[in-house]
Amino acid sequence: MPVPVSRLQVDSSVAATSPKGYSDAELRQAMRDVPEIYAMLDRGVPPREILDLRGHSDPHLRSVGTTYGHLFGATPSSQVLAADVVNGQLEVTKGNHRIRAARQAGVEVLPVEVAAQTAEELDAVASEARGADPARYPRFEQAHARATSLGRDAGRDQASSERSVSRDERART
């Protein structure tokens, strides 16, 4: 689901550097691609075309395609962001470094797999996100719906980037 970056609580005990070896500059660049991805989806660019940019000769467009594939759950090797609802807060469980980079890059909304104990908790998160940017939120939801269908078409399992799941369900996947 699309979640305002300001709503995500990162774990301050997580090391300052990415365990996957990405530099801060690489992570910030990837996060800078997110608004462009949303704009492309908003203009009606098919998700498959955005994903296909991974093979483009232009380094910037290649970066956009790669970021889309990783963050929007569009490929089996996606690196989706994840958070649990704990006492009404969204605590990041996957992607602390990327979320820090998104904040530094000024990104406002990211696709996050949200886990909660109840449907009511998930509804509250979605409602708050809609209220944070009511004019743009429907476009973000549509972008995630298109990314989800692409992920299914690409053979992804049910754990797509926008799908909200329970903690127990996430543990099983």
Image (cartoon, helix red, strand yellow):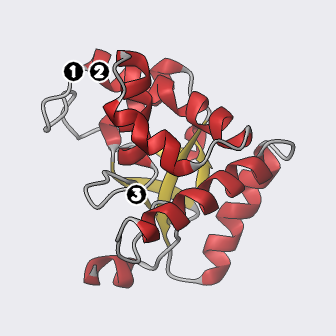
Tell me how many marks there are. Answer: 3
Labelled pair 2, 1 in contact (Cβ < 8 Å): yes
Residue 165: percent from left, percent from top: 47, 76
Residue 121: percent from left, percent from top: 62, 74
Q: Is residue 151 above or below residue 41?
A: below
Q: Which mark is residue 23?
A: 1
Q: CA distance from mark 2 to mark 3?
A: 20 Å
Residue 13: percent from left, percent from top: 24, 40
Q: Is residue 113 above or below residue 121?
A: above
Q: Which mark is residue 26?
A: 2
Disc on the earlier residue, 1 or 3: 1
Q: Is residue 141 above or below residue 31?
A: below
| Secondary structure of residue under mark 1 | loop
Residue at x 12%, y 30% (from the top left corner): 21
Residue at x 46%, y 60% (from the top left corner): 161
Give the amino acid at mark 1: Ser
| Secondary structure of residue under mark 3 | strand
* Mark 2 neighbour class, 10 Å CA radius: few under 14, some 14 to 19, many 20 or more: some
Give the amino acid at mark 2: Glu
Labelled pair 1, 3 in contact (Cβ < 8 Å): no
Residue at x 60%, y 50% (from the top left corner): 3
Task: Tell me the quadrant of the picture where the C terminus can be found.
Answer: bottom left
66 or 7: nearer the viewer: 66
Residue found at the far right of this picture: 135
* Quarter of the view holding residue 136: top right
* Mark 3 neighbour class, 10 Å CA radius: few under 14, some 14 to 19, many 20 or more: many
